[in-house]
Image (cartoon, rainbow, N blue to C red):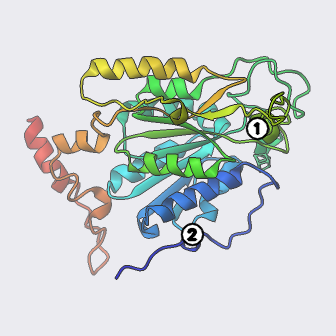
Amino acid sequence: MAVKLTLANYRTNVHNDWCPGCGDFGILSAIQMALADMQLDPSNIAIFSGIGCSGKTPHYINTYGIHTLHGRVLPYALGAKLANPSLIVLAVGGDGDGLGIGAGHFVNAGRRNVDITYIVHDNGVYGLTKGQASPTLKRGLRPKSLPRPNINEAINPIAIAIAAGYTFVARAYAYDNKHLKEIIRKAISHKGSAFIDVLQPCPTYNDITTKEWYAGEDRIDPETRKPIPRVYKLEDTGYDGEVQSPDPAEAEKKIAVALAKSFEWGDRIPIGVFYRNPYVPSYEERIASRIPNYLTIPPARQPIHDAEKHPTADIEQIMEEFLVTEA
Ligand code: SF4
């Protein structure tokens, strides 16, 4: 009988140096809970990170992991998945890392629909480097780390992800880690590129979009005398972003609704799955349609040396059919 994996199987004993109260903790625990819930073998998971506070995430999860370069988390993650399509691949990074310097990779990954999950820690600042404005900080806001209000417009990560072609696009909130866990589970189960924008307070540098602000503690319901939370769940409103048929016209309709919804902000901030289309072929399926050997003997599943340590990788095994097909 298989041994049941628990949360302890996905934790490491690496010292965690995030600031107390950081939303990163909620994201980390949600990832670990999702992996444990799904009983995924840690030895078949690889987690990649960029540079930033969130870059430490793979250090704290007991799977394979690589802490990569600034803005380059997606090329690493995509490369690993394409080399070994049976691997479960997660990429994590900050909003500055992925939507600033890494924006080109973010957009172009959407076109391919490689089967990975990309989680962005979105706090509006570059926390690791003392709180400069990130691409998601709204124009006119002045968190305590800035000498003057932000002069740039903010980008909309949900709208960009949908326009770029991601086939699973969601937003979550770091302090609601049970809901985030469910979103991560759905994202990992989805066959294709999944993007999750996680709203994540940075108590050290961003004193505007704080935990208290998301909870609506500055506005009290006169009847209940309780705060009116800004974050609400799409699924509680009957919203359904799931495409139900391969008809492109249906996908277009869902995209239009999801895009409109993605601009809702301020007093009401939706979280949940904005859009999912299971009918777009993954990149792995597209490659396999040209190279039939690809899924059976992908590069990472071939022996790399013989008993004498001579290299044995033979790309021609994979390419044989491809060359015949293309001839
Ligand atoms: Fe978290 Fe901000 Fe501290 Fe970074 S600087 S660990 S994002 S609270």
Tell me which amino acid carries mark 1: Ala
- What residue is shown with label 1? 215
Which numbered disc, 1 or 2, marks the residue closer to the eye? 1
**Image point 22% across, 59% down: which residue?**
297
Which is nearer the eye, 163 or 224? Answer: 224
Assign a secondary structure to mark 1. loop
Residue 100 x, y percent position in the rendering? 63, 31
Q: Locate residue 90 relative to residue 54 in the image: left or right.
A: left
- What residue is shown with label 2? 7
Residue 108 x, y percent position in the rendering? 44, 30
Placement of 166 over or under 43, stated as above or below:
above
Assign a secondary structure to mark 2. helix
Placement of 248 over or under 76, stated as above or below:
above
Label ID, residue 197: none
Tell me which amino acid carries mark 2: Leu
- Would you call the spot at circle 1 few (<14 residues within 10 Å), some (14-19), or many (20 or more)? some
